Amino acid sequence: MSEPEHLLQLEGVAKHFGGLYALSGLSLHVDEGEIVSVIGPNGAGKSTMFNVITGLYEPDDGTIRFRGDGIVGLAPNRITKLGIARTFQTVHLFPNMTILENAMVGQHCRTRSGVLGSVLRLPATRREEEQIRERARKALAFFGSRLAGYREDQPAFALSYANRRRLEMARALATDPAIVMLDEPTAGMNPRETLELRDHIVRMRDELGLTLLVIEHDMRVVKGVSDRVIALDYGRKIAEGSYDEVANDPQVIEAYLGTKAVG
Amino acid sequence: MGVPTRSIVRAGLIGGVAAIFIALVGLYTKFATLELVGEQITLGRLMIVAPALVAAYAVTRPRIVAGERRVVSLRDGLIAGALTGLGTGIVFAAGTWFADLFGVDRIREVFISVTDELIAFLTFDKGIPGGLVILIVICIVGGVVGGFVRTAPEPIRKPAAVGVLAVLLFGLLQRIVPIALVELGYDADWLYRAGSGLTVLGGVVVFAVAAIADILWNRGGRRLKDRVRQTTETAPAARLGLFLVLVAILAILPLLLGSVISETLGQVMIYVLLGLGLNIVVGYAGLLDLGYVAFFAFGAYTTGLLTGAFLNTTTGAAQPALSADLNFYVAVWIVALLAAGLGLLIGAPVLRLRGDYLAIVTLGLGEIVSVITASKWAQPLIGGPQGMRGVTKAEIFGLNPQDNPQHFYYLALAFVLLAAFVSWRLSTSRIGRAWTAMREDEQVADATGISTTKFKLLAFAMGGAIGSLGGALFAVSIGSLTPASFEITVSITALAVVILGGLGSIPGVVVGALVLIGLPGLLREFEDYRPLIYGGALVAIMILRPQGLIPNVRRTRELAEEEVAQDAWAGGGPSGEGEAVAAVVPGGSLGGEREDLE
């Protein structure tokens, strides 16, 4: 049976910490050019799913395929190099590096100059360094003037909260990914910033041709960007479909609001 | 009253206890007769004043009261200083009195430095009640000076402080400066008394010259420095020129300074190499390695083996089980290469370890190497407890680095420049960026596409290769190797050099080595107190300047400057909303402890 090939596919993925099943038998897929949102109450296993996909945790069971190849057991840096970039729920930048340097680190896995080239500053190395800088700037420019100009040389810790989130996304973009996984990108942002970010997510797909997998709590954002929504609870997929289908699914409502008291 | 009474009492007590400590460890008796200026100002006597002075200097610091920075006025500063000195003096005098009452001989059973001479020295030979009054008065004077140095108007206190420090330095370098002057063909009888400290005239002249230099520097020097910096930033040719001038100065230095200082500088440069190597591991990559002596020993012994050294045995010289007879300048590259391999070997088992655990394991690995060098087991190869001798003299172009310290200086300088160049180029490259990212957040670096395995191993290999050069030079400089040279103190000292200078900073390593190896090397009188000075220096640096003497830019980025740029931009540009938050909370959630990535 020839199944259509998905960009990213999870099958029967399980992950438990001691007796706690963070993920059990989770199967889902993401197709090229889609924006898929993952929703679910706190502790549903959304971030664990991200960590399992990106190799920070190894799943206890199941397979994860990226472009048809299994990626379970690969080191996180190898998975990033394959084309899966991510951001974290709590922002994780390199705080004492400058904004430009943060983005330049993203280009690391696309470049190759080694010790000899770096020490002798060979022409090829210099060209590559120039190219790293250029591409990092391009990634920063995605967010307009917010990360450009004088800010380039500021340490990341000096940025506002919203800009840190943007920089983290720019760093992910700088890895030249095929799919970007955003973990609650609008958490802690004010309504205006949230709106702006919603546009950014859509632009990532439309202008950069990326596929996105987004964990999001803000239902306006989920509604505005998603081609498809997947709801998790207790590490299982409880619903999948368009925003309206999922939002009206009784199981989803129950997961968010609790079981009706039987009386 | 500008300074809280409680602070004064506390500072006085601490000063007094410090003074008693100095007395108990024997510093006073040791330096009682080391004359700095004239016959009266000896180092021992200055040390009597020092605790009160430092305590008063500390207690009159500007304080933050109700969110406002308050500078202590000169009058309050002098009063608080005098009171602090009084407190110090009373505690000190009480201690001295107690020692006399209790019986010097009984105390000496534990503190061997407590003698009748010490009591006599502290009481200025005037007996117990009278001498103690003098002691208290001297402490009060010290306190007043301390308060003055902190609270006097800047145009007065800075040149005065610089002048006094210059006099102290020239006084302490009494065995070095006159010799250097004589070697330059200049007779300095008026400056130094024969075999002793500065003359009174010399002291005054040194003070005046230093103070005037400081004033001139404040007038125009800053601007000059800024100008030089600007030019070098815009024109690469100017930077090259500055570099050449620096190299030229370094090249003629041993001719100016004579062989005594050159020898010390050679030792300094061995530690600069160790520091540069360790700096890659600890400073750039953030891997705390406490077993760095392994590379030092490996470099030294491998150099011996490759250049045809002999083993010391009870029956005479013997050929090592495995050896070659290569030219040093060929062998040294093989040594570095092998050391890089050793770096991989040491790095591989500790890849998964972080922080404290890494430190403990590397400590153990270093200790293993130390033990092997001294073991009977390794005797056929490296001589075991008896060691080896006859390491190559590394002669080249008529230079003899082993027997002539000035020639060794040039050899070491070449290696230091090479190592500094390599680490600078690495730190500013893609590799350096990967190391920094890894140091900042290993897990995130991995998730951003950096192979942490590869770059950790690379750090150990590069650090090991550079460190082994230090070992190779050490082997050449003394010609014979014994296990006593390869103990854990080497690891600790190298780490102290890196930390004192500033983690991740190449100039910092140089300054750290100059301070920790150079100064004790020049001031042989302090040899017995080297660990005490190391400890004191490290504690002081951690409290006063945790980023090190010459910190890495990245580690001290000043938020203030950034804020100015930000405000200027926000004023003219579009929205700058939310920026103020970051300015108030530097680092914010980023700088603090990391939570799990969940």
Image (tube, grey):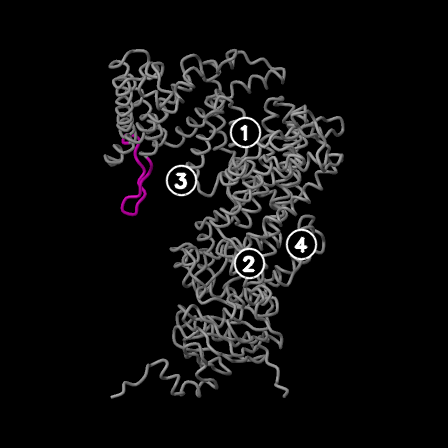
The label shown at residue A114 is 4
Which amino acid, mark 1? Gly
The residue pinned by badge 3 equals B543
| Cα–Cα span, label 1 and label 3 | 23 Å
Q: Report which residue position mark 2 lands on.
A: A100
Callout 3 secondary element: helix
Is A29 or A181 nearer to us in this picture? A29
Q: Are marks 1 and 2 on the same chain?
A: no
- Where is residue B150 drawn, in percent x and y? 36, 32
> Which subunit holds the residue at mark 2?
A
From the image, tell me which residue sits under label 1.
B518
User: Could you say which is closer to the camera, residue B449 or residue B85?
Assistant: B449
Per the rendered image, the range of residues in magenta is B61-76
Name above or below for residue B75 compared with residue B238.
above
Location of residue B80 in the rendering, given as x and y in whole percent from the top left corner: 27, 30
Please rate how many residues cluster around mark 2, counting C-alpha atoms within 10 Å: few if below 14, some from 14 to 19, many from 20.
many
Is residue B242 something that shows in the picture? no
Q: Position of residue B592 (x, y in %)?
A: 41, 55
What numbered label is drawn on residue A233? none
Circle 2 SS class: helix
| Mark 1, secondary structure of its residue | helix
Mark 4 and mark 1, same subunit?
no
For marks 3 and 4, give the CA distance: 39 Å
